[in-house]
């Protein structure tokens, strides 16, 4: 897209030049920060208002206004907001992830929300809520804000002084309206394309799972006669196949628990795998922690090539997920939340595909100990997993087929994920360019021309 006809120096290093006719002001001169709730002091305390916990504020700039509370319940200890305010989350990682929103559709025009919100009330004689929203949506606002964060760990926050003193490129009001309308339109298009790619990824993942599950329970020849498996929820399996408990074809090795007292004991420091390292179908070895253990315990917890790693649990999607260990790190052990299943009567690859199938996942969930959003399975229940077992030559053929088909689907998923990354980068670049005047969007909006 074309640039403005003329520019001038802004006096701000990161901002560079701004279009002629634009001003540069500190944010505090165009908004009021965290306005006082005294303006509704006379309201009936039974008046319903919107309630906004942090989870109601989206990383996409939306808010969920479904929660409603009487004013008396929320007027103390929460952040006050009004229709047309703009707010952003100031605590890590919510700030870095872009949690922010325009206040729209509030019950009786009022909301109270988490204290981790910074509220910006636009001074309507100099700016608009929509333009302020896009200003704080820019990557520059987040990048610079991160540098100002204070505190430790998960309690780091962006101070109000950062927002007050943030330099704002400020076009005339009509241009602010045009820029906000342009970004509303163009980002909606990009968001729709991202949503399409995410739907595609979901369909490909569903197809991938279906390929695995069908191949390990029915084989590759649709004409093969079937027989009852003896397990109601598993159904029929091909003739010539067995169904045996895992304990008959593999040994389950439990891992080491952290926090043991090693005082007075000779120790060694070794790498160990955690749940975070054991993903669904691959191992993430970028960050492998170290642990100090008694030297005479090393052999007991040592991983060996061919072990099938499986997670004991955690979030529901982590239950039973895993991959084959190929000895990438030597020596290496595993924590107690990761099982090492060591096959002796079946190939590691076959066992890995079986444990990743729908029927195995159903078994894990049905035998797991569950609480809110969490599940775990014991080694005893794991050893009772019914494993479908074709002859060795057929195992090999099926494994080869699954690897080929899932590799093709994984490649398509990777392509879609790359497309999402590029779209999101383009979205961020478009926002920053528009709100800082690096592109002139006025004609594009008037003619309906798409952004370059």
Image (cartoon, helix red, strand yellow):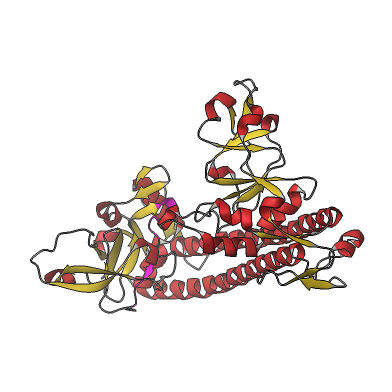
Q: How far across and down, in percent of the image, does residue 219 sit?
A: 47, 66
The quadrant of the image that shows the N terminus is: bottom right
Relative to 253, 434 lies left or right: right
Magenta segment includes 205: no
Check the image and report above or below for 16 versus 210. below
Q: Does the magenta-highlighted stretch encompass residue 324?
A: yes
Of all residues, the one furthest to the right in this rendering is: 447
Residue 215 lies, in percent from the top left, at 48, 65
Residue shown at 24% from the left, 73% from the top? 270
Please give the range of residues in magenta: 315-326
Q: Between 172 and 45, which is closer to the camera in this rendering?
A: 172
Residue 235 visible, this angle: no
Side of 327 where 190 appears, left or right: right
**Residue 178 falls in which quadrant of the image?**
bottom right
Between 193 and 342, the one lying in front of the other is: 193
Drawn side of residue 137 relative to residue 324, left or right: right
- Quadrant assignment for the C terminus: bottom right
Q: Position of residue 116 (x, y in %)?
A: 52, 46
Residue placed most toward the observer, 58 or 117: 117
Position of 429 relative to 121 (above/below): below
Q: Residue at x 71, y 40 (%)?
A: 104
Which of these two is toward me, 261 or 223? 261
Measured as percent of width and height from the top left, residue 391 is found at 36, 70
- Above-or-below relation of 163 to 297: above
């Amino acid at each position: 897209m074309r640039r403005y006809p003329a520019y001038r120096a802004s006096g701000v290093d990161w901002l560079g030049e701004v279009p002629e006719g634009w001003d540069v002001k500190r944010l505090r001169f165009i908004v009021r920060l965290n306005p006082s709730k005294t303006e509704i002091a006379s309201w009936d305390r039974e008046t319903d208002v919107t309630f906004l916990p942090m989870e109601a504020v989206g990383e996409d700039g939306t808010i969920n206004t479904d929660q409603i509370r009487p004013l008396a319940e929320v007027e103390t200890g929460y952040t006050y907001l009004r229709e047309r305010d703009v707010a952003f989350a100031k605590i890590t990682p919510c700030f870095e992830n872009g949690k922010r929103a325009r206040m729209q559709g509030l019950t009786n025009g009022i909301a109270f929300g988490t204290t981790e919100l910074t509220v910006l009330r636009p001074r309507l004689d100099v700016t608009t809520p929509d333009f302020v929203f896009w200003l704080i949506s820019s990557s520059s606002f987040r990048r610079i804000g991160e540098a100002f964060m204070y505190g430790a760990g998960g309690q780091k926050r962006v101070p109000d002084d950062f927002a007050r003193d943030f330099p704002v490129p400020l076009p005339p009001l009509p241009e602010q309206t045009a820029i906000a309308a342009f970004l509303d339109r163009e980002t909606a298009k990009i968001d729709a394309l991202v949503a399409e790619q995410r739907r595609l990824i979901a369909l490909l993942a569903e197809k991938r799972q279906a390929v695995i599950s069908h191949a390990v329970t029915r084989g590759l020849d649709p004409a093969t006669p079937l027989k009852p498996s003896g397990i109601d929820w598993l159904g029929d399996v091909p003739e010539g196949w067995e169904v045996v408990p895992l304990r008959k074809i593999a040994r389950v090795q439990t891992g080491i628990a952290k926090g043991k007292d090693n005082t007075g004991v000779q120790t060694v420091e070794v790498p160990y795998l955690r749940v975070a390292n054991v993903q669904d179908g691959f191992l993430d070895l970028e960050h492998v922690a170290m642990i100090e253990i008694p030297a005479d315990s090393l052999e007991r917890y040592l991983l060996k090539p061919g072990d099938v790693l499986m997670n004991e649990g955690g979030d529901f999607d982590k239950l039973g997920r895993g991959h084959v260990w190929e000895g990438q790190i030597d020596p290496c052990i595993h924590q107690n939340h990761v099982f090492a299943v060591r096959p002796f009567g079946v190939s590691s690859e076959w066992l890995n595909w079986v444990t990743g199938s729908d029927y195995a996942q159903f078994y894990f969930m049905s035998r797991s100990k569950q609480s809110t959003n969490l599940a775990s399975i014991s080694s005893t229940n794991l050893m009772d997993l019914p494993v479908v077992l074709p002859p060795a030559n057929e195992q090999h053929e099926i494994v080869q087929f699954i690897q080929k088909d899932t590799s093709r689907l994984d490649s398509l998923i990777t392509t879609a994920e790359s497309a999402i990354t590029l779209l999101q980068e383009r979205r961020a670049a478009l926002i920053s360019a528009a709100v800082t005047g690096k592109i002139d969007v006025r004609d594009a909006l008037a003619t309906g021309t798409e952004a370059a």
